[in-house]
Image (tube, rainbow, N blue to C red):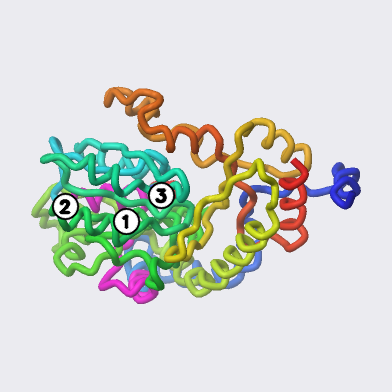
Amino acid sequence: MEIEATMSNQENRQKIPCVDLKTQHQALKKEIFDAFERVYDATAFSSGPFVEEFETAFAAYLGTRSAVGVSNGTVALHLAMRALGIGPGDEVIIPANTFIATAWGVSHAGASPVFVDCDPDTWEIDVGKAAAAVTDRTRAIIGVHLYGQPFDVDALKAVCRERRIALVEDAAQAHGARYKGVRVGGFGEMACFSFYPGKNLGACGEAGAIATNSESLTTRLRSLRNHGSSVRYYHHEIGYNYRMGGLEGASLSIKLRYLDGWNDRRRAIAAVYRHGIQNKKIRLQGAPPWADSVHHLFVVTTEARDELVEFLKDHGIVPAFHYPVPCHLQKAYSHLGYQPGQLPNAEYLSSHCVSLPMFPELTDTQVREVIQAVNAY
Ligand SMILES: Cc1ncc(COP(=O)(O)O)c(C=O)c1O
Protein backbone atom coordinates (compact mmCIF):
# COMPACT_ATOMS: atom_id res chain seq x y z
CA MET A 1 0.00 0.00 0.00
CA GLU A 2 2.71 2.35 1.06
CA ILE A 3 4.52 1.93 -2.23
CA GLU A 4 1.33 2.48 -4.20
CA ALA A 5 0.79 5.76 -2.37
CA THR A 6 4.37 6.81 -3.08
CA MET A 7 4.01 5.95 -6.74
CA SER A 8 0.86 7.98 -7.22
CA ASN A 9 2.99 11.02 -6.47
CA GLN A 10 5.59 9.95 -8.96
CA GLU A 11 5.24 12.93 -11.24
CA ASN A 12 6.24 15.21 -8.39
CA ARG A 13 9.04 13.01 -7.25
CA GLN A 14 12.71 13.30 -8.06
CA LYS A 15 14.16 10.26 -9.76
CA ILE A 16 16.64 8.19 -7.73
CA PRO A 17 19.80 8.00 -9.85
CA CYS A 18 22.24 5.10 -9.81
CA VAL A 19 24.99 7.50 -8.81
CA ASP A 20 24.98 11.20 -7.96
CA LEU A 21 28.12 13.28 -7.65
CA LYS A 22 26.51 16.67 -7.14
CA THR A 23 25.56 16.54 -3.45
CA GLN A 24 29.03 15.49 -2.35
CA HIS A 25 30.79 18.05 -4.53
CA GLN A 26 28.56 20.89 -3.45
CA ALA A 27 29.32 20.07 0.20
CA LEU A 28 33.08 20.07 -0.47
CA LYS A 29 33.14 22.99 -2.88
CA LYS A 30 34.71 25.59 -0.59
CA GLU A 31 37.37 23.25 0.78
CA ILE A 32 38.35 22.01 -2.68
CA PHE A 33 38.28 25.45 -4.31
CA ASP A 34 40.62 26.73 -1.59
CA ALA A 35 43.01 23.90 -2.44
CA PHE A 36 42.69 24.68 -6.17
CA GLU A 37 43.70 28.25 -5.37
CA ARG A 38 46.85 26.99 -3.65
CA VAL A 39 47.72 24.84 -6.70
CA TYR A 40 47.04 27.79 -8.97
CA ASP A 41 49.16 30.20 -6.94
CA ALA A 42 52.00 27.69 -6.91
CA THR A 43 51.47 26.92 -10.64
CA ALA A 44 51.97 23.30 -9.64
CA PHE A 45 49.75 21.95 -12.40
CA SER A 46 51.64 18.81 -13.39
CA SER A 47 53.07 16.45 -10.73
CA GLY A 48 54.69 18.50 -7.96
CA PRO A 49 54.00 18.93 -4.25
CA PHE A 50 50.22 18.47 -4.31
CA VAL A 51 50.56 15.13 -6.07
CA GLU A 52 53.38 14.06 -3.76
CA GLU A 53 51.33 14.97 -0.71
CA PHE A 54 48.51 12.77 -1.94
CA GLU A 55 50.85 9.90 -2.86
CA THR A 56 52.28 9.88 0.67
CA ALA A 57 48.85 10.03 2.30
CA PHE A 58 47.38 7.33 0.07
CA ALA A 59 50.31 4.94 0.64
CA ALA A 60 49.94 5.48 4.40
CA TYR A 61 46.21 4.82 4.12
CA LEU A 62 46.83 1.55 2.25
CA GLY A 63 49.84 0.55 4.34
CA THR A 64 52.07 0.18 1.27
CA ARG A 65 55.61 1.43 0.71
CA SER A 66 54.47 3.77 -2.04
CA ALA A 67 51.68 4.93 -4.28
CA VAL A 68 52.69 6.31 -7.66
CA GLY A 69 50.18 8.84 -8.97
CA VAL A 70 49.28 8.65 -12.67
CA SER A 71 46.74 10.16 -15.01
CA ASN A 72 44.04 7.45 -14.75
CA GLY A 73 43.40 3.84 -13.78
CA THR A 74 43.82 2.48 -17.29
CA VAL A 75 47.39 3.75 -17.58
CA ALA A 76 48.06 2.48 -14.05
CA LEU A 77 47.33 -1.01 -15.39
CA HIS A 78 49.46 -0.38 -18.48
CA LEU A 79 52.41 0.80 -16.40
CA ALA A 80 52.06 -2.18 -14.03
CA MET A 81 52.42 -4.49 -17.03
CA ARG A 82 55.40 -2.53 -18.37
CA ALA A 83 57.08 -2.45 -14.97
CA LEU A 84 56.84 -6.26 -14.83
CA GLY A 85 58.48 -6.45 -18.24
CA ILE A 86 55.33 -7.92 -19.82
CA GLY A 87 55.13 -7.51 -23.58
CA PRO A 88 54.47 -9.21 -26.92
CA GLY A 89 54.15 -12.99 -26.71
CA ASP A 90 53.14 -12.91 -23.04
CA GLU A 91 49.76 -13.82 -21.59
CA VAL A 92 48.00 -12.27 -18.62
CA ILE A 93 44.97 -13.93 -17.03
CA ILE A 94 42.03 -11.70 -16.08
CA PRO A 95 38.37 -12.26 -15.22
CA ALA A 96 35.95 -11.83 -18.13
CA ASN A 97 33.47 -9.87 -16.02
CA THR A 98 35.25 -6.62 -15.35
CA PHE A 99 35.39 -3.16 -16.85
CA ILE A 100 37.26 -3.44 -20.15
CA ALA A 101 40.18 -1.31 -18.90
CA THR A 102 41.53 -4.29 -16.93
CA ALA A 103 42.24 -5.83 -20.34
CA TRP A 104 43.46 -2.60 -21.97
CA GLY A 105 46.47 -2.52 -19.67
CA VAL A 106 47.53 -5.93 -20.99
CA SER A 107 46.82 -5.10 -24.65
CA HIS A 108 48.58 -1.73 -24.49
CA ALA A 109 51.69 -3.56 -23.28
CA GLY A 110 51.47 -5.75 -26.41
CA ALA A 111 50.55 -8.91 -24.46
CA SER A 112 47.40 -11.06 -24.76
CA PRO A 113 44.65 -11.07 -22.18
CA VAL A 114 43.37 -14.55 -21.35
CA PHE A 115 39.84 -14.31 -20.00
CA VAL A 116 38.56 -16.69 -17.35
CA ASP A 117 35.13 -17.24 -15.86
CA CYS A 118 33.87 -16.02 -12.51
CA ASP A 119 32.47 -17.87 -9.52
CA PRO A 120 28.68 -18.16 -9.93
CA ASP A 121 28.06 -17.04 -6.34
CA THR A 122 30.58 -14.27 -5.55
CA TRP A 123 31.08 -13.25 -9.20
CA GLU A 124 34.80 -12.88 -8.41
CA ILE A 125 37.48 -14.55 -10.54
CA ASP A 126 37.18 -18.36 -10.38
CA VAL A 127 40.57 -19.27 -8.92
CA GLY A 128 40.44 -22.87 -10.17
CA LYS A 129 39.76 -21.70 -13.71
CA ALA A 130 42.57 -19.13 -13.44
CA ALA A 131 44.98 -21.88 -12.34
CA ALA A 132 43.88 -24.08 -15.25
CA ALA A 133 44.48 -21.24 -17.73
CA VAL A 134 48.17 -20.81 -16.82
CA THR A 135 50.52 -21.74 -19.68
CA ASP A 136 54.26 -21.37 -20.30
CA ARG A 137 53.52 -17.89 -21.64
CA THR A 138 51.55 -16.65 -18.61
CA ARG A 139 53.35 -13.87 -16.78
CA ALA A 140 50.70 -12.53 -14.40
CA ILE A 141 47.15 -12.74 -13.12
CA ILE A 142 45.16 -9.56 -12.54
CA GLY A 143 42.53 -10.11 -9.86
CA VAL A 144 39.71 -7.57 -9.78
CA HIS A 145 38.04 -6.59 -6.50
CA LEU A 146 34.69 -6.52 -8.26
CA TYR A 147 32.11 -3.89 -7.28
CA GLY A 148 34.30 -3.10 -4.24
CA GLN A 149 34.38 -6.65 -2.83
CA PRO A 150 37.78 -8.34 -2.47
CA PHE A 151 38.45 -11.52 -4.45
CA ASP A 152 39.94 -14.52 -2.64
CA VAL A 153 43.44 -13.09 -2.37
CA ASP A 154 45.09 -16.00 -0.55
CA ALA A 155 43.82 -18.55 -3.06
CA LEU A 156 44.93 -16.51 -6.08
CA LYS A 157 48.24 -15.67 -4.46
CA ALA A 158 48.90 -19.39 -3.91
CA VAL A 159 48.38 -20.05 -7.63
CA CYS A 160 50.75 -17.20 -8.55
CA ARG A 161 53.39 -18.32 -6.09
CA GLU A 162 53.25 -21.93 -7.27
CA ARG A 163 53.43 -20.99 -10.94
CA ARG A 164 55.98 -18.20 -10.35
CA ILE A 165 53.91 -15.49 -11.93
CA ALA A 166 53.00 -12.03 -10.68
CA LEU A 167 49.77 -11.06 -8.95
CA VAL A 168 48.41 -7.60 -9.75
CA GLU A 169 45.31 -6.25 -8.01
CA ASP A 170 42.86 -4.18 -10.00
CA ALA A 171 41.56 -2.17 -7.05
CA ALA A 172 39.89 0.51 -9.17
CA GLN A 173 36.57 -0.11 -7.40
CA ALA A 174 37.85 -0.99 -3.95
CA HIS A 175 39.54 1.92 -2.15
CA GLY A 176 39.44 0.95 1.54
CA ALA A 177 38.01 -2.56 1.08
CA ARG A 178 39.52 -5.18 3.39
CA TYR A 179 40.47 -8.80 2.84
CA LYS A 180 40.72 -10.71 6.15
CA GLY A 181 40.94 -7.36 7.92
CA VAL A 182 43.71 -5.86 5.77
CA ARG A 183 43.12 -3.11 3.23
CA VAL A 184 43.51 -4.24 -0.37
CA GLY A 185 46.36 -2.69 -2.32
CA GLY A 186 49.41 -4.47 -0.91
CA PHE A 187 48.72 -8.12 -1.65
CA GLY A 188 50.34 -8.49 -5.05
CA GLU A 189 53.39 -7.04 -6.79
CA MET A 190 51.29 -3.96 -7.53
CA ALA A 191 47.73 -2.69 -7.13
CA CYS A 192 46.11 -0.33 -9.61
CA PHE A 193 43.61 2.29 -8.53
CA SER A 194 41.33 4.57 -10.51
CA PHE A 195 40.22 7.95 -9.20
CA TYR A 196 37.66 8.47 -11.95
CA PRO A 197 35.12 10.93 -10.48
CA GLY A 198 32.45 8.26 -9.87
CA LYS A 199 34.74 5.97 -7.85
CA ASN A 200 34.57 5.67 -4.03
CA LEU A 201 37.58 7.99 -4.04
CA GLY A 202 37.25 10.14 -7.14
CA ALA A 203 39.33 13.10 -8.27
CA CYS A 204 37.96 16.36 -9.63
CA GLY A 205 39.30 15.19 -12.98
CA GLU A 206 40.95 11.98 -14.16
CA ALA A 207 43.58 10.25 -12.04
CA GLY A 208 44.93 6.89 -10.94
CA ALA A 209 47.71 5.32 -8.87
CA ILE A 210 49.81 2.19 -8.56
CA ALA A 211 50.54 0.99 -5.02
CA THR A 212 53.48 -1.29 -4.34
CA ASN A 213 55.74 -2.50 -1.56
CA SER A 214 58.73 -2.78 -3.88
CA GLU A 215 61.34 -0.05 -3.98
CA SER A 216 62.60 -1.08 -7.41
CA LEU A 217 59.08 -1.12 -8.89
CA THR A 218 58.43 2.30 -7.36
CA THR A 219 61.52 3.72 -9.07
CA ARG A 220 60.63 2.07 -12.37
CA LEU A 221 57.01 3.28 -12.29
CA ARG A 222 58.08 6.84 -11.48
CA SER A 223 60.43 6.81 -14.43
CA LEU A 224 57.98 5.21 -16.87
CA ARG A 225 55.21 7.70 -16.10
CA ASN A 226 57.62 10.56 -16.68
CA HIS A 227 59.01 9.90 -20.19
CA GLY A 228 61.35 7.13 -19.02
CA SER A 229 63.36 9.68 -17.11
CA SER A 230 64.53 10.28 -13.58
CA VAL A 231 66.91 13.11 -14.49
CA ARG A 232 65.36 15.82 -16.62
CA TYR A 233 66.00 15.45 -20.37
CA TYR A 234 67.87 12.15 -19.90
CA HIS A 235 65.75 9.21 -21.02
CA HIS A 236 67.02 5.73 -20.30
CA GLU A 237 63.99 3.94 -21.77
CA ILE A 238 60.91 4.64 -23.86
CA GLY A 239 58.40 6.08 -21.45
CA TYR A 240 55.08 7.89 -21.29
CA ASN A 241 53.56 11.09 -20.09
CA TYR A 242 51.24 9.49 -17.55
CA ARG A 243 51.70 12.08 -14.77
CA MET A 244 48.95 13.13 -12.40
CA GLY A 245 47.86 16.78 -12.40
CA GLY A 246 48.22 19.06 -9.36
CA LEU A 247 44.52 19.96 -9.22
CA GLU A 248 43.61 16.29 -9.19
CA GLY A 249 46.19 15.55 -6.48
CA ALA A 250 44.94 18.40 -4.30
CA SER A 251 41.30 17.32 -4.62
CA LEU A 252 42.24 13.74 -3.75
CA SER A 253 44.12 14.70 -0.58
CA ILE A 254 40.98 16.40 0.68
CA LYS A 255 38.62 13.63 -0.32
CA LEU A 256 40.84 10.91 1.16
CA ARG A 257 39.98 12.31 4.61
CA TYR A 258 36.31 11.58 3.95
CA LEU A 259 36.75 8.17 2.34
CA ASP A 260 36.22 5.98 5.42
CA GLY A 261 33.07 7.88 6.34
CA TRP A 262 31.68 7.53 2.81
CA ASN A 263 32.57 3.82 2.76
CA ASP A 264 30.83 3.32 6.11
CA ARG A 265 27.70 4.91 4.69
CA ARG A 266 27.91 2.64 1.61
CA ARG A 267 28.26 -0.38 3.94
CA ALA A 268 25.23 0.77 5.95
CA ILE A 269 23.15 1.18 2.79
CA ALA A 270 24.26 -2.24 1.53
CA ALA A 271 23.31 -3.81 4.87
CA VAL A 272 19.83 -2.26 4.67
CA TYR A 273 19.47 -3.44 1.06
CA ARG A 274 20.61 -6.97 2.00
CA HIS A 275 18.20 -7.15 4.92
CA GLY A 276 15.31 -5.47 3.15
CA ILE A 277 15.33 -7.11 -0.29
CA GLN A 278 13.19 -10.20 0.18
CA ASN A 279 12.04 -10.79 -3.38
CA LYS A 280 12.80 -14.41 -4.34
CA LYS A 281 13.29 -13.35 -7.97
CA ILE A 282 16.33 -11.26 -7.01
CA ARG A 283 19.82 -12.63 -6.31
CA LEU A 284 22.58 -10.74 -4.52
CA GLN A 285 26.36 -11.03 -4.79
CA GLY A 286 27.65 -13.81 -2.51
CA ALA A 287 29.58 -12.18 0.33
CA PRO A 288 32.25 -14.43 1.89
CA PRO A 289 33.05 -13.68 5.57
CA TRP A 290 36.63 -12.57 4.78
CA ALA A 291 35.52 -9.91 2.30
CA ASP A 292 34.70 -6.48 3.67
CA SER A 293 33.29 -4.73 0.59
CA VAL A 294 33.16 -0.98 0.11
CA HIS A 295 30.19 -1.41 -2.25
CA HIS A 296 31.30 0.71 -5.15
CA LEU A 297 28.25 -0.77 -6.88
CA PHE A 298 25.28 -2.74 -5.61
CA VAL A 299 24.54 -5.29 -8.29
CA VAL A 300 21.73 -7.85 -8.29
CA THR A 301 20.67 -10.42 -10.87
CA THR A 302 17.24 -11.52 -11.98
CA GLU A 303 15.97 -13.83 -14.73
CA ALA A 304 13.87 -11.29 -16.65
CA ARG A 305 16.23 -8.34 -16.43
CA ASP A 306 14.42 -6.08 -18.89
CA GLU A 307 11.17 -6.43 -16.94
CA LEU A 308 12.86 -5.44 -13.69
CA VAL A 309 14.51 -2.46 -15.36
CA GLU A 310 11.20 -1.21 -16.79
CA PHE A 311 9.52 -1.75 -13.43
CA LEU A 312 12.20 0.21 -11.58
CA LYS A 313 12.09 3.02 -14.14
CA ASP A 314 8.31 3.23 -13.73
CA HIS A 315 8.98 3.66 -10.02
CA GLY A 316 11.42 6.51 -10.51
CA ILE A 317 14.58 4.45 -10.04
CA VAL A 318 17.34 4.66 -12.64
CA PRO A 319 19.28 1.39 -12.80
CA ALA A 320 22.48 0.64 -14.75
CA PHE A 321 24.38 -2.43 -16.00
CA HIS A 322 27.90 -3.38 -14.94
CA TYR A 323 28.69 -4.68 -17.45
CA PRO A 324 26.33 -5.54 -20.32
CA VAL A 325 28.94 -7.39 -22.43
CA PRO A 326 31.73 -9.50 -20.90
CA CYS A 327 35.25 -8.67 -22.06
CA HIS A 328 35.78 -11.88 -24.04
CA LEU A 329 32.74 -11.12 -26.24
CA GLN A 330 33.58 -7.46 -26.89
CA LYS A 331 34.12 -6.69 -30.57
CA ALA A 332 37.54 -5.28 -29.75
CA TYR A 333 38.64 -8.79 -28.76
CA SER A 334 36.92 -10.74 -31.53
CA HIS A 335 40.37 -11.61 -32.95
CA LEU A 336 40.99 -13.77 -29.86
CA GLY A 337 38.26 -16.14 -31.05
CA TYR A 338 36.14 -16.49 -27.91
CA GLN A 339 32.62 -17.82 -28.51
CA PRO A 340 29.35 -17.26 -26.62
CA GLY A 341 28.86 -20.04 -24.09
CA GLN A 342 32.57 -20.38 -23.33
CA LEU A 343 32.50 -18.48 -20.02
CA PRO A 344 28.91 -19.10 -18.90
CA ASN A 345 28.96 -17.48 -15.45
CA ALA A 346 30.37 -14.20 -16.75
CA GLU A 347 27.91 -14.27 -19.64
CA TYR A 348 24.99 -14.95 -17.31
CA LEU A 349 26.02 -12.02 -15.14
CA SER A 350 26.25 -9.69 -18.12
CA SER A 351 22.79 -10.49 -19.37
CA HIS A 352 21.07 -10.58 -15.96
CA CYS A 353 22.80 -7.90 -13.86
CA VAL A 354 21.15 -4.71 -12.65
CA SER A 355 22.93 -2.08 -10.55
CA LEU A 356 20.74 -0.46 -7.92
CA PRO A 357 21.39 3.11 -6.73
CA MET A 358 24.51 3.24 -4.55
CA PHE A 359 26.31 6.34 -3.34
CA PRO A 360 26.94 7.68 0.18
CA GLU A 361 24.49 10.57 -0.13
CA LEU A 362 21.47 8.31 -0.80
CA THR A 363 18.92 9.19 1.88
CA ASP A 364 17.28 6.61 4.12
CA THR A 365 13.99 7.42 2.41
CA GLN A 366 15.48 6.76 -1.03
CA VAL A 367 16.97 3.46 0.18
CA ARG A 368 13.54 2.44 1.50
CA GLU A 369 11.93 3.39 -1.79
CA VAL A 370 14.39 1.25 -3.73
CA ILE A 371 13.74 -1.73 -1.44
CA GLN A 372 9.98 -1.29 -1.68
CA ALA A 373 10.13 -1.14 -5.46
CA VAL A 374 12.42 -4.18 -5.75
CA ASN A 375 10.19 -6.18 -3.42
CA ALA A 376 7.06 -5.10 -5.28
CA TYR A 377 8.50 -6.36 -8.58
C1 LIG B 1 37.77 -2.47 -12.63
C2 LIG B 1 38.30 -1.24 -13.31
N1 LIG B 1 39.54 -1.25 -13.82
C3 LIG B 1 40.08 -0.17 -14.42
C4 LIG B 1 39.38 1.00 -14.54
C5 LIG B 1 39.99 2.13 -15.32
O1 LIG B 1 40.11 3.30 -14.61
P1 LIG B 1 40.05 4.74 -15.37
O2 LIG B 1 38.64 4.96 -15.77
O3 LIG B 1 40.51 5.69 -14.31
O4 LIG B 1 40.97 4.68 -16.51
C6 LIG B 1 38.09 1.07 -13.99
C7 LIG B 1 37.28 2.31 -14.00
O5 LIG B 1 36.89 2.96 -14.85
C8 LIG B 1 37.53 -0.07 -13.38
O6 LIG B 1 36.29 -0.06 -12.88
The span from disc 3 to disc 2 (Cα, nearest Å) is 20 Å
Magenta region, main secondary structure: helix
58 part of magenta stretch: yes
358 part of magenta stretch: no
The span from disc 1 to disc 3 (Cα, nearest Å) is 12 Å
Quadrant assignment for the C terminus: top right
- The image position of residue 310, as x and y in percent, is 71, 33
Which residue in the rendered view is the most extreme toward the left?
236
The mark found on residue 169 in the picture is: 1
Vertical position of residue 268 compared to residue 342: above or below: below
- Please give the name of the residue rendered at 56% of the width and 35% of the height, measured from the top-left corner: 352
Q: In terms of sequence position, does the residue under pointer 3 or pointer 2 come before the other?
A: 3
The mark found on residue 282 in the picture is: none
Vertical position of residue 306 compared to residue 60: above or below: above
The mark found on residue 165 in the picture is: 2
Q: Say what secondary structure mark 2 lies in.
A: loop
Identify which residue, 29 or 38, lies in the foreground.
29
- Give the amino acid type for the residue marked by disc 2 in the picture: Ile
Vertical position of residue 50 compared to residue 362: above or below: below
Asked whether residue 210 is in view, the answer is no
Identify which residue, 305 or 279, lies in the foreground.
279
Judge left or right: residue 33 versus residue 63: right
Q: Nearer the viewer, mark 1 or mark 3?
A: 3
Query: In the rendered image, which residue does mark 3 sit on?
Result: 124
Marks 2 and 1 close (CB-CB < 8 Å): no
- Please give the name of the residue rendered at 53% of the width and 58% of the height, measured from the top-left corner: 295
Q: Say what secondary structure mark 1 lies in.
A: strand
Q: Residues within 10 Å of mark 2 (few under 14, many from 20)?
A: some
Magenta stretch, residue numbers:
54-83
